[in-house]
Amino acid sequence: MHITLHRAGRGSRESRGAADQHDSSVKMANPLRAEVVRLYKNLLYLGRDYPKGGDYFKERLRVAFTKNKSVQDPERIKELIARGEYVARELEALYYLRKYRAMKKRYYNE
């Protein structure tokens, strides 16, 4: 992203206004971007304890997000976010179940 400003000195009101206007148009074009980044970070955090290993999960996560990076339709992006949140909930359930089984083994001889 390169901005060329004519007749506006560095730090002048005109240059700041043009830069602010450019930044706001970028933010308005991607209102769901912050939500996607939050989901990616959350899944990355949850993937640390994945049964096949954190590196395995991290690579699969990267591939999945890269595959869908060109999606522009807001409704489709919302569907993908919902799917990612479902995966996050499933991972949390998997970890709770694993923790429960480990505790049960300690106290019961079955």
Image (cartoon, rainbow, N blue to C red):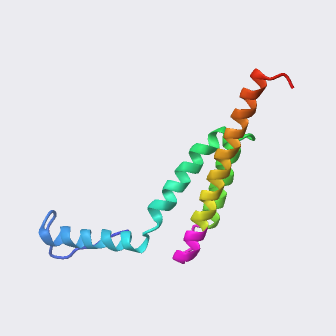
Q: Is residue 68 left or right of residue 97?
A: left
Q: Residue at x 80, y 23 (%)?
A: 108
Query: Which residue is at the front of the view, 8 or 42?
Result: 42
The answer to whether residue 70 of the structure is visible from this angle is no
Residue 63: quarter of image: bottom right
Residue 44, percent from left and from top: 58, 47
Number of numbered discs visible in the structure rendering? 0
Query: Which residue is at the front of the view, 23 or 100?
Result: 100
User: Does the stretch in magenta take in 22?
Assistant: no
Q: Is residue 68 left or right of residue 15?
A: right
Q: Decide: is 12 above or below 98.
A: below
Q: Is residue 18 left or right of residue 60?
A: left
Residue 52, percent from left and from top: 75, 41
Quarter of the image containing the C terminus?
top right
Q: Residue at x 67, y 47 (%)?
A: 91
Q: Residue at x 67, y 42 (%)?
A: 55
Residue 29, percent from left and from top: 41, 74
Residue 9: quarter of image: bottom left
Q: Specify the segment rendered in magenta.
A: 69-79
Residue 85: quarter of image: bottom right
As drawn, which residue projects farthest toward the right?
A: 110
Q: Decide: is 69 above or below 37.
A: below
User: Does the stretch in magenta take in 76?
Assistant: yes
Query: Which residue is at the front of the view, 89 or 106?
Result: 106
Quarter of the image containing the N terminus?
bottom left
Q: Decide: is 11 above or below 57.
A: below
Residue 77, percent from left and from top: 56, 70
The answer to whether residue 85 of the structure is visible from this angle is yes
